[in-house]
Image (cartoon, rainbow, N blue to C red):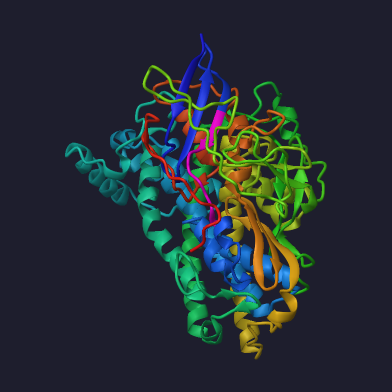
Amino acid sequence: MSKHIVVDPITRIEGHLRIEAVIDENNTIVDAYSASTMFRGIETILQGRDPRDCGLLAMRICGVCTGTHYQRSIEAVEDAFKITIPKNARIVRNLIQGALYVHDHLVHFYHLHALDFVDVVSALSADPAKTAAEARKWAAVAGESPFIDGEGEFKAIQDRVAKFVKQGRLGIFGNGYWGNAHYKLTPEQNLIGVAHYLQALEIQRDLAKMQAIFGGKNPHPQSIVVGGVTCVQDIQNPARIAQFKSLLLAGRKFVKEAYLPDVYMAGTMYAGEATDSKATFTELMAGKGVGGTGGGLLNYMSYGDFRLDDTGFYKSGLLFPSGIVYGGDISKVADVDQAKIAEDVTHSWYKGDKPLHPYEGQTIPEYTGLDKREDGIAYLKTKEKYSWIKSPIYNDTRVEVGPLARMVVGVARKDKRITKYVTEFLQRGNLPIAVLFSTVGRTAARAIETSLMSDVMIEWVDELAANAAAGDLKTWTDFNFDEVSMSTKGMGLAEAPRGSLGHWVSIADGKVVNYQAVVPSTWNAAPRDYKGRMGAYEASLIGTKVANPEQPLEIIRTIHSFDPCIACAVHVVDTKGKELAVYKVDTSCSI
């Protein structure tokens, strides 16, 4: 007999996400639905605005990757105006975005996702001396020294957590499914995870400072404008560049000595879930597996990002190449054609009768509510509309975006730098590339990308220092607004930490006439489309076995591996689906 599980809200994420899953008599998920119960209307607010102001408003779409939405919006207008920014502006934007990547990925792994693998309470029974030895073991796998090298510090952290538990004050660790049968780390490994969790709180603070050095503030940086950047004094001051590099090197040390070893440790202990159980080891080593637990769609897309030269936004070389890989087949990769992108609202709380390209897209709310049930819980109307998220489609195919997609596309493109980092990671762990197509692989891909980014940013900060020292202090490209803004349109397509992000803007008589953003969590968290096909979250849950339906740890672990970010809300519900209030939004309003 099947059973219906509702996880609402999914915790430790930005925004409000609901997952409903149907499990069979073996506790295996046979159907799943992803829904955001919050509305985002920034696109509507932007209509009628001066396009040069879009970035400052569009960044409010998110409370985490604010700078990414900011830059994509500015770039959409620059694309419309045919502006190429100076070298210093390109490098500074790369550094702001790169700092966001390292900060975002580190916060995601330790503070939003690690406790899906780490049992905090189990850490209390660990032997600190054995824990230190275990830390050295996994650091050696990564080719590094351990970030903590001694039982004394592990003992101090263990005593600190034990004191909280004894007092009944678990605080940030208060709501885990501790003791669940699907926690697989040893007590010593759990203590390593807890120790690095606490230390990462300090590290992430300094990584956020890096974004503020050139961005002016964090979150919501202020220094990116249409045509370039305004942080002129920071570029001219060697001390500011040196401060950025110093913080980068400290963060990089934690990434290499703690983050990578911890991912090797967790990945090895959960390796059984990361591979196709039907494939032989030889087949897996040849990349012929079709995905482990959480694999999902197996279609991966990247717009590409981080310009490496100054030949123009869509002409320059890229750190992350663009492309699409279908079915996990890395022997083939297709080019991305933005004309093939569309959004469907068949199962979304919006008006519309067919998929539309973002230039033609509309955001007209049509909320139809939840089902009513006698057990006190309101379920989604899964045959009808059931989410505020639209369903993006590429070339009439559902795709996954994010760090895993970037690594898969990079390998398929035979990009030398990405292939080197992915191959080295897999070889050190004696892992086949097929492990990437899973929940564990999605988590590992984010760590690989963080390691790569923390290295390449050193090259960029040195490039900026050398360019400024050589006397090139240009930061902005002049343009005649009255001439370029009469009738035009543009797009800012690149990569946010969570995946492919696009902003499309249409401009007439110096004002925005239409604006649409298709964000990473839209691609991944979307509901069914007009053909009834699942989005990435939904597909990734199918076939997952749940150890305890009352503690759906496995659902949370897989959903967290995408780093969900469901931001900006006006709708209010309680955890049982009871309606508290309804707000009617006049979509023609502006502020």
Q: Position of residue 154 (x, y in %)?
A: 32, 47
Does the magenta run of residues contain 575?
no
Q: Nearer the viewer, residue 582 or 159?
A: 582
Q: Nearer the viewer, residue 148 or 343?
A: 343
Question: Which residue is at 41% across, 23% downward?
Answer: 181
Position of 250 relative to 378 (above/below) = below
Position of 277 relative to 507 (above/below) = above
Question: Which residue is at 60% across, 81% downward?
Answer: 465
Question: Which residue is at 59% across, 31% downward?
Answer: 538
Residue lying at the far bottom of the rendered structure = 471
Res 135 seen here? yes
Magenta region: 33-42
Position of 1 relative to 569 (above/below) = above
Q: Position of residue 562 (x, y in %)?
A: 56, 42
Left or right of 438 on screen, residue 262: left
Q: Nearer the viewer, residue 259 or 498?
A: 498
Which quadrant of the view contains residue 162? top left
